[in-house]
């Protein structure tokens, strides 16, 4: 609050207050929220593809496990899903630590 009051006292307009005080203090939370939502959407896409056969990696996962019964392919797809989720988490941590 002190930074916003100081900016208002110096005659800053709404844009200056937004980009000089509010955005820098909330950027880490915005990045964390964005990555969290992206990971949730990715997992939902995998689950919906497996459950409804809509396509994508979930559909391939379902077909390899239930239709073809190819456990090597199921394992590879599982590892790819895990690797992608871990890559997103590590990139989120690295980006937040830089800021």
Image (cartoon, rainbow, N blue to C red):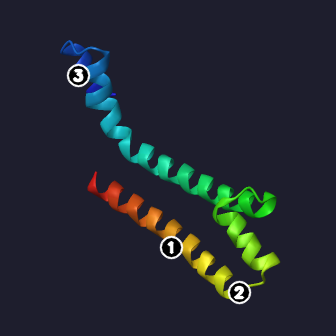
Lateral position of residue 59 relative to residue 27, left or right: right
Residue at image mark 3: 6
Q: Residue at x 38, y 47 (%)?
A: 28
User: x%, y% of residue 27?
Assistant: 37, 42
The secondary element bearing badge 3 is classed as: helix
Give the crowd class for mark 3: few <14, some 14-19, many >=20 residues within 10 Å.
Answer: few
**Mark 2 sits on what residue?**
71
Image quarter of the N terminus: top left
Judge from the rendering whether residue 9 lies leftward or rightward of residue 58; answer left or right: left
- Do we see residue 16 in this rendering? yes
| Tag 3–tag 1 contact (CB < 8 Å) | no
Which dot marks residue 83?
A: 1
Separation of marks 3 and 1 at Cα, in angstroms: 46 Å
Q: Quadrant of residue 58?
A: bottom right
Q: Residue at x 78, y 84 (%)?
A: 69
Q: Residue visible at 76% across and 78% down?
A: 65
| Relative side of 33 to 21, left or right | right
* Above or below, comparing residue 13 to residue 42 in the picture: above
Nearer to me, 38 or 72: 72
Residue 11: which numbered mark, if any? none
Residue 2 visible in this rendered orientation of the protein: no
User: x, y percentage for residue 15?
Assistant: 30, 20
How far separated are the C-alphas under marks 3 and 2? 63 Å
Q: Nearer the viewer, mark 2 or mark 1?
A: 2
Count of numbered circles on the image: 3
Badge 1 marks a residue whose secondary structure is helix
């Amino acid at each position: 609050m002190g930074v916003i009051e100081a900016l208002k006292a110096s005659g800053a307009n709404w844009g200056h207050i937004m980009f000089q005080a509010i955005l820098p203090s909330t950027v880490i939370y915005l990045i964390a929220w964005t990555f969290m939502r992206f990971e949730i959407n990715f997992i939902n896409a995998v689950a919906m593809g497996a459950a409804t056969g809509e396509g994508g990696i979930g559909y391939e996962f379902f077909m390899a496990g239930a239709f073809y019964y190819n456990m090597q392919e199921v394992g590879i797809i599982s590892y790819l899903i895990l690797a992608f989720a871990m890559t997103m988490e590590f990139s989120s941590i690295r980006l937040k630590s830089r800021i």
